[in-house]
């Protein structure tokens, strides 16, 4: 399937507003069947329902709108915890979970996210009720300027989900999709290891 | 509010004995950790105001051109476009890649609309010869791109010191002489938050609010006053959080001026943040350099003569490089000569970047120290110690040597060689910095309800400044850090310094201490009637105040504050004797070189760093690690690359401009030099970035005999150095 027809499918279905819970393949099949003019379908904004941090949010997007843009500038109120740094999948500052899997939201078209639960950094905890990973980032000083921190927090949650017993080398591999300029890496690794130890001792692992 | 009734005869503030400290000199988690870790911290990028416009810049793709026309018509009719203007007229020149290459600015209702309109601008321009390399700049008849008045070439004024003939004579008498030429590329700051502002205009009788990603909340109002057409006192700058500066964010820049202009013209809030590619093109860099360094030593290892010729490559700016000998000493100063000049290219001007010029100087000087040691058959650490005046450097070098396993290392006075294509080596480097301190103020407010606010117009670049703004007050008043609210990042607060050259701590911490001390003494005046002991005879600890030597006469903090009828405001200022001027550091790096593929893997890095009293050991280790990592990244990966034929900036994204990631990070040991018992505080962020890449180059040389004279230390560079050009 071409990228073009994929886009058309996704937006059409999203516009219909009925796709929460169905698979992407179903969405595309449905849109192909709809047979609307491709030119029309590729133009303009349409409403999309996405599930962010457990809440259904309606957001007006274009086919080209990335999930990152949808979160930061299209939603009202916006969710600005997720950061834009490189815009091309090099740095991981925009990392969110989609269907529980870490993804670069700058490389993900919003229209492909209908029916796929999204978790952003805000979804893991709040300053008064932080997740174990967020707490460990504070305790170990896994941040300096903090601009990469939301992406690292999400990536660390995902890494410890995928590889709960990862050794240091494996942790570095798991976190290699994220860049930090201040040089917080050693303390980020310490934070991840502190969470591992805590969870191994029976911590709740929020 | 009552002003502090501080008595002139009162005691002076003091940092106190280290063994008595309850808050400082410990690991203090940063007070803004929770908002940063949960995505709640609002950076300038994140500011959203009602009715806000989104602005974008159009930057010419090559550094030099003659503008024929800039067609705005189609773009101005695009949906959502509210403001569009060209910054160049037909016939104008684009003189360099940087702010001069900004052709137009657009503001629209949405970010996408601004980007669309940018693409619809029709630029016709004649591209001119690029002049992006020093070779192009120095060619006979090269176009003059220097911004110097009446410049007739691209060579800036040379800074010549010493007498070359005397240096030559001294070198002729040396037992060992090494001469090398070094090439150091331009490095970018790569702040993860790009430069920019959100500006909210206001009627004449109200302040304009500017959200700025800046290292200078205090200086930014002045920088925008003229463009905004109002006095700086009626511009309020807010920087609650900022995503890195490293020396590149001192003024509003062209992007700030344009945001101000659009806000004025439209009467609407404007969000203008550079894109990542804009950032690489116009937001500054660390200057490159080319250096030819000749150094000689006697049989005892002492340096006897030195000659340096260097070009600073700072684009249209001068670039920076301290004069030789860098840190090390040549006994006879007359035996040192140097010629340092700027060679200008049509590229973005260099800006301050974490220890400007120092890492470049370190790279050449540490290489010379290694090579002279090997020529003389001398231990690398011993060679350095013989040429360093400061005992602090001696103990720090011994400490990092011990930590990295130097004593057990098999080749300490000659390079090793590969076994089965694998070679392991260790290298060293030293640093100095003299940040000092300057005028800064702080207000500490204690309210009758027991709440405490410590306020100063500093900014936290990620250094942990916000945390010590609270922690210093907590220490003085016997409170926990959480009981003191730190207010920073607001130009309306008592003025403090621009955060550059590691001056923030040495300037603001004494003022905070002074304010806290005055608040404490004012409270002790009130206590004289209650606990019946004179000012100066109280112990403030664990949320209680008690009479020294009589713990039975005590009051809890909340009861002390209840004695206040109104909030107490104590005003502190910079106190010379509370700060320290000079710091030292030493680093060691251990690497593994794959001599078949040329790959360098850094195995371990160690730093020992002094800074007077450590305010926050946790943040300090973060800073030391950060310095080592940025130096590692500089050494192994970073390089700005222009296409020499047409002048396109090729490395304008994070795929092609590499910075260190998780997998490059070795074992890291950040040692705080606790033998430094100076009773004063000092910033230290510049120092640990200075020698790391030099120590890595030394370790590569020590591992396999390849002296890399070109950065970064990529595999092809290593192979070429080992086996010659293929």
Image: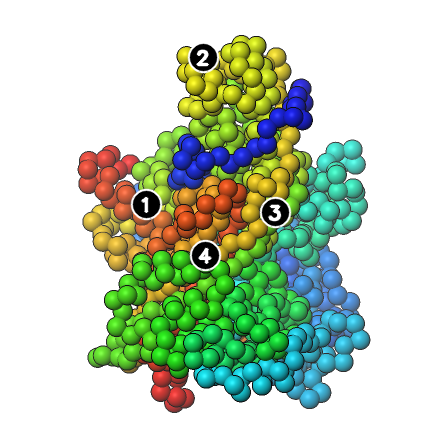
Q: Which of the two discs, 4 and 1, sits closer to the camera?
A: 4
SS at circle 3: loop
Q: Earlier in the sequence, mark 3 or mark 2?
A: 3
Residue under label 4: B392
Residue under label 3: B437
Q: Are the residues under badges 2 and 1 in a single subunit?
A: no
Q: Are the residues under badges 4 and 3 in a single subunit?
A: yes
User: Is B8 situated left or right of B298 in this image?
Assistant: right
Write down the chain letter for disc 2.
B
Q: Disc 2 to disc 4, how far (Cα)?
A: 45 Å
Q: Earlier in the sequence, mark 4 or mark 3?
A: 4
Q: Disc 3 to disc 2, how far (Cα)?
A: 39 Å
Q: Disc 3 to disc 1, how far (Cα)?
A: 34 Å
Q: Disc 4 to disc 1, how far (Cα)?
A: 33 Å
Q: Are the residues under badges 4 and 1 in a single subunit?
A: no
Q: Are the residues under badges 3 and 1 in a single subunit?
A: no
Local packing at callout 3 (Cα closer than 10 Å; few below 14, some 14-19, many 20+) is many
Residue under label 1: A191
Residue B30 visible in rendering: yes
Task: Choose between B268 and B327: the one closer to the eye.
Answer: B327
């Amino acid at each position: 399937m071409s990228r073009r027809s994929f886009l058309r499918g996704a937006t059409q279905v999203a516009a219909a507003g009925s796709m929460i819970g169905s698979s992407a393949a179903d969405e595309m099949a449905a849109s192909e069947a709809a047979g609307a003019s491709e030119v029309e379908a590729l133009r303009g904004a349409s409403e999309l329902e996405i599930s962010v941090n457990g809440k259904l949010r309606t957001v007006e997007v274009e086919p080209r709108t990335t999930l990152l843009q949808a979160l930061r500038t299209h939603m009202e109120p916006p969710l600005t915890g997720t950061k834009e740094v490189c815009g091309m999948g090099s740095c991981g500052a925009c990392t969110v979970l989609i269907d529980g899997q870490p993804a670069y939201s700058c490389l993900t078209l919003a229209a492909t996210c209908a029916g796929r639960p999204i978790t952003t950094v805000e979804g893991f905890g709040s300053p008064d009720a932080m997740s174990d990973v967020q707490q460990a980032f504070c305790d170990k000083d896994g941040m300096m300027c903090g601009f990469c921190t939301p992406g690292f927090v999400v990536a660390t949650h995902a890494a410890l989900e995928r590889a709960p017993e990862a050794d240091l080398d494996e942790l570095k591999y798991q976190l290699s999709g994220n860049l930090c300029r201040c040089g917080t890496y050693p303390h980020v690794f310490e934070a991840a290891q502190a969470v591992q130890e805590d969870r191994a001792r029976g911590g709740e692992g929020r | 509010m009552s002003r502090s009734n501080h008595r002139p005869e009162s005691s002076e503030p003091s940092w106190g004995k280290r063994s008595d400290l309850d808050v400082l000199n410990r690991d203090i988690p940063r007070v803004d950790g929770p908002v940063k870790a949960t995505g709640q911290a609002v950076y300038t990028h994140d500011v959203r105001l009602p009715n806000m416009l989104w602005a974008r810049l159009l930057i010419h793709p090559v550094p030099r051109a003659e503008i024929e026309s800039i067609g705005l018509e189609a773009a101005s009719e695009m949906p959502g476009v509210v403001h569009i203007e060209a910054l160049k007229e037909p016939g104008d020149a684009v003189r360099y890649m940087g702010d001069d290459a900004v052709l137009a600015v657009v503001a629209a209702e949405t970010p996408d609309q601004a980007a669309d309109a940018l693409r619809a601008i029709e630029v016709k321009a004649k591209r001119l010869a690029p002049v992006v390399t020093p070779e192009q700049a120095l060619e006979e008849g090269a176009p003059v791109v220097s911004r110097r008045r009446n410049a007739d070439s691209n060579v800036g004024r040379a800074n010549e010191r010493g007498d070359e003939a005397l240096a030559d004579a001294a070198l002729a008498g040396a037992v060992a002489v090494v001469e090398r030429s070094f090439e150091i590329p331009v490095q970018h700051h790569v702040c993860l938050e790009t430069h920019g502002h959100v500006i909210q205009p206001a009627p004449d009788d109200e302040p304009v609010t500017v959200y700025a990603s800046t290292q200078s909340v205090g200086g930014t109002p002045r920088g925008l006053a003229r463009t905004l057409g109002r006095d700086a006192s009626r511009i309020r700058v807010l920087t609650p959080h900022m995503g890195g500066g490293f020396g590149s964010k001192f003024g509003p820049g062209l992007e700030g001026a344009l945001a101000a202009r659009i806000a004025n013209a439209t009467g609407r809030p404007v969000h203008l943040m550079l894109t990542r590619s804009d950032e690489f093109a116009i937001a500054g860099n660390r200057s490159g350099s080319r250096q030819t360094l000749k150094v000689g030593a006697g049989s005892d290892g002492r340096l006897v003569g030195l000659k340096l010729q260097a070009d600073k490559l700072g684009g249209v700016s001068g670039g920076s490089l301290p004069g030789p000998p860098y840190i090390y000493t040549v006994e006879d100063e007359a035996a040192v000569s140097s010629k340092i000049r700027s060679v200008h290219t049509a590229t973005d001007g260099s800006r301050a970047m974490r220890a400007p010029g120092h890492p470049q100087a370190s790279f050449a000087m540490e290489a010379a120290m290694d090579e002279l040691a090997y020529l003389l058959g001398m231990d690398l650490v011993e060679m350095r110690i013989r040429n360093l005046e400061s005992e602090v450097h001696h103990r720090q070098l011994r400490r990092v040597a011990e930590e990295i396993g130097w004593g057990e290392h098999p080749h300490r006075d000659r390079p090793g060689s590969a076994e089965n294509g694998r070679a392991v080596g260790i290298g060293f480097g030293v640093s100095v910095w003299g940040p000092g301190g300057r005028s800064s103020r702080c207000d500490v407010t204690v309210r009758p309800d027991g709440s405490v606010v410590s306020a100063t117009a500093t900014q936290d670049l990620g250094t942990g400044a916000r945390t010590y703004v609270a922690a210093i007050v907590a220490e003085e008043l016997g409170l926990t850090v959480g009981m003191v609210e730190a207010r920073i990042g607001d130009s309306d607060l008592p003025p403090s310094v621009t955060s550059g050259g590691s001056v923030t701590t040495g300037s603001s911490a004494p003022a905070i201490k002074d304010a806290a001390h005055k608040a404490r003494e004012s409270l002790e005046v009130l206590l004289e009637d209650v606990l019946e002991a004179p000012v100066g005879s109280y112990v403030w600890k664990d949320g209680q105040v008690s009479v020294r030597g009589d713990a039975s006469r005590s009051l809890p903090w909340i009861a002390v504050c209840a004695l206040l009828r109104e909030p107490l405001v104590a005003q502190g200022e910079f106190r010379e004797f509370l700060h320290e001027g000079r710091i030292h550091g030493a680093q060691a790096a251990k690497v593994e070189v794959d001599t078949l593929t040329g790959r360098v893997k850094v195995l371990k890095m160690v730093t020992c760093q002094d800074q007077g009293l450590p305010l926050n050991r946790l943040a300090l280790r973060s800073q030391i690690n950060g310095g080592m990592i940025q130096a590692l990244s500089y050494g192994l990966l970073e390089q700005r690359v222009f296409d020499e034929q047409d002048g396109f900036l090729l490395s304008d994204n994070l795929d092609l401009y590499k910075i260190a990631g998780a997998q490059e990070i070795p074992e890291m040991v950040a040692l705080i030099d606790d033998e430094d018992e100076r009773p004063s505080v000092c910033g230290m962020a510049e120092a640990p970035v200075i020698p790391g890449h030099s120590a890595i180059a030394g370790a590569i040389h020590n591992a396999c005999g390849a002296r890399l004279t070109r950065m970064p230390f990529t595999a092809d560079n290593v192979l070429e150095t080992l086996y010659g050009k293929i």
